[in-house]
């Protein structure tokens, strides 16, 4: 029933900029299942990072991260429960010419491949027992051959799998070691200006030394006080105005498709070039309250810390927050704090599907591409990048960078094309390690927790009322690496049922043992 074909993905898309792979066997699956993290771009996340990743971010979506009896947040402790053994070791030299030599370094081409007809029969039978409408594509990671295709060319609502497209554009223009700066400027006539520079994970207090909250507003206030206190104490200025400069980005700050319910539930807030804890009022390990105005919260908190420092020093100086600056100032920079490396922020944002951070990432990529830092400029920048990389953009339409808008469109084939790109171009390979791991972390932490799926299935999830998606990598019980993408509609908001049916299809794919006799 299902057509099978060789997709011609690699032959059709020979990237002009494709680099030769690193001679070290990084291992798509070896590296991922071994937890090497970002292919050496920077050290793997610390234990604190893992704890933060385990926090309950989308509690309103039926405990997407935490599905036990509690309704609050939990912190992950102990070792990750990876039940399945790694099915792939270092691959031997390929004995066939089925794959590019680069791909052969990362994929065990000698593991038994599923027979397309048997796989199609198994997946068709599984879909026949389900109640929702599913589209699905399966591609052999070693050969690029499409093994299963049900609606793969249909333009569907991608939900948060759109973040994969935004991430490709981000790494096209910025390195994983890039850091965002939040600075303070001072001039006697205009006072202090807090200038947003793209960090959406600011800490309200001191630095946490972890990805979330790596740069702290208390630290920035201390540096500011050290720089200006002598001048303030020596002058007659007893009141100093504090404003926030958000001019790095253009409005509108909220997309017209984003409902008040999305904002109230903590999914997103106004897109300014600075925010706290990924759009939360407190660290995600203990808070899930959304920020109504990240610029105002940062400005007020920064001002509070300055007043505390002045009082502790016995200085007759008062700092007063006065809202957003009407226009950028040319005052002298007196203090700066810098974020964790972009690679770490991207990993956190992808695993937790953080909409606020991806809207900021889209604008930062647009700025680097000399495009407008707004919804239109950033999404057009992503489309331009995909065109340059040889990916078919005709069926694509992006309304935002996070996938919250139900007006965005993508196909399952173009989504899988992104995984092929990550595999065949080392510039984008760090994205493979941002995928959430079944039974372990992020939005898949409490899904597919049993063997042989836990620790083996790695995906990017996406959930909207209009449609839900799940796309990524699995390793069959016979050791074959497969890309897959699923899009589901008809759930009418029953997200638990949607996730259960998507997981069932991924389990059938993983455990099919559909090798031809």
Image: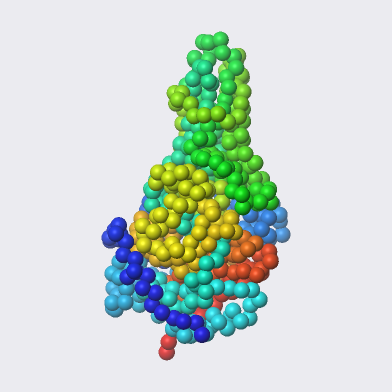
Camera-nearest residue between 145 and 84: 145
Q: Is residue 388 left or right of residue 335?
A: left
Camera-nearest residue between 93 and 356: 356
Image x and y of residue 242, in percent? 57, 25
Image x and y of residue 433, in percent? 45, 58
Q: Quadrant of residue 141?
A: bottom left
Note whether residue 87 is visible: no
Which residue is drawn at the image coordinates 59% and 45% (left, top)? 254
Note whether residue 140 is visible: yes
Which residue is drawn at the image coordinates 58% and 55% (left, top)? 404
Which residue is drawn at the image coordinates 32% and 73% (left, top)? 99
Image x and y of residue 294, in percent? 59, 39
Q: Residue furthest bottom?
A: 517
Image x and y of residue 444, in percent? 57, 62
Count how many numbered circles sit on residues in the image: 0
Camera-nearest residue between 253 and 286: 253
Camera-nearest residue between 121 and 340: 121
Which residue is drawn at the image coordinates 41% and 64% (left, top)? 392
What is the image's colouring? rainbow
Q: Quadrant of residue 140?
A: bottom left
Q: Quadrant of residue 239?
A: top right
Question: Please, is residue 405 above or below residue 198 in the view?
Answer: below
Question: Please, is residue 40 above or below residue 184 in the view?
Answer: below
Check the picture and name the quadrant holding the C terminus.
bottom left
């Amino acid at each position: 029933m299902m057509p099978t074909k060789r997709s011609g993905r690699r032959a059709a898309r020979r990237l002009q900029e494709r680099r030769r792979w690193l001679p070290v066997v990084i291992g798509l699956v070896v590296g991922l299942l071994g937890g090497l993290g970002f292919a050496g771009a920077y050290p793997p996340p610390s234990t604190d990072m893992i704890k933060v990743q385990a926090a309950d971010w989308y509690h309103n979506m039926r405990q997407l991260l935490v599905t036990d009896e509690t309704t609050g947040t939990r912190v992950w402790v102990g070792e990750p429960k990876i039940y399945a053994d790694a099915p792939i070791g270092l691959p031997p030299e390929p004995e066939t010419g089925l794959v590019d030599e680069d791909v052969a370094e990362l994929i065990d081409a000698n593991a038994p491949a599923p027979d397309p007809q048997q796989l199609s029969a198994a997946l068709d039978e599984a879909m026949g027992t389900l109640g929702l409408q599913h589209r699905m594509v399966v591609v052999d990671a070693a050969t690029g051959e499409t093994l299963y295709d049900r609606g793969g060319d249909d333009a569907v609502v991608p939900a948060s799998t759109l973040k994969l497209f935004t991430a490709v554009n981000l790494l096209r223009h910025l390195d994983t070691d890039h850091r965002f700066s939040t600075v303070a400027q001072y001039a006697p006539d205009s006072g202090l200006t807090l200038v947003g520079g793209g960090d959406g994970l600011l800490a309200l207090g001191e630095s946490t030394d972890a990805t979330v909250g790596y740069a702290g507003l208390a630290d920035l206030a201390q540096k500011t006080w050290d720089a200006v206190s002598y001048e303030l104490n020596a002058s007659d200025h007893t009141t100093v105005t504090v404003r926030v400069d958000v001019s790095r980005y253009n409005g509108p700050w909220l997309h017209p498709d984003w409902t008040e319910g999305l904002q109230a539930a903590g999914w997103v807030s106004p897109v300014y070039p600075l925010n706290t804890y990924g759009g939360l009022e407190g660290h995600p390990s203990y808070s899930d309250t959304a920020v109504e105005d990240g610029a105002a919260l940062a400005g007020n908190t920064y001002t509070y810390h300055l007043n505390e420092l002045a009082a502790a020093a016995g200085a007759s100086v008062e700092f007063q927050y006065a809202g957003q600056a009407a226009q950028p100032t040319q005052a002298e920079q007196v203090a700066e704090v810098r974020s964790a490396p972009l690679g770490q922020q991207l990993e956190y944002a992808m695993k937790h599907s953080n909409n606020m951070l991806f809207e900021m990432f889209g604008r930062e990529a647009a700025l680097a591409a000399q495009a407008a830092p707004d919804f239109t400029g950033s999404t057009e920048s992503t489309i331009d990048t995909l065109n340059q990389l040889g990916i078919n953009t005709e069926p694509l339409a992006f309304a935002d960078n996070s996938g919250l808008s139900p007006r965005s469109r993508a196909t399952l084939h173009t989504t899988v094309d992104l995984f092929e790109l990550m595999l065949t171009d080392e510039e984008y390979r760090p994205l493979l390690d941002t995928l959430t791991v079944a039974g372990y972390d992020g939005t898949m932490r409490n899904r597919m927790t049993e063997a042989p799926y836990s620790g083996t299935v790695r995906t990017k999830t996406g959930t909207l009322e209009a449609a839900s998606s799940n796309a990524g990598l699995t390793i069959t019980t016979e050791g074959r690496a497969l890309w897959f993408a699923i899009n589901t509609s008809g759930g009418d908001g029953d997200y638990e049922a949607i996730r259960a049916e998507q997981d069932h299809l991924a389990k059938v794919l993983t455990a099919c043992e559909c090798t031809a006799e």
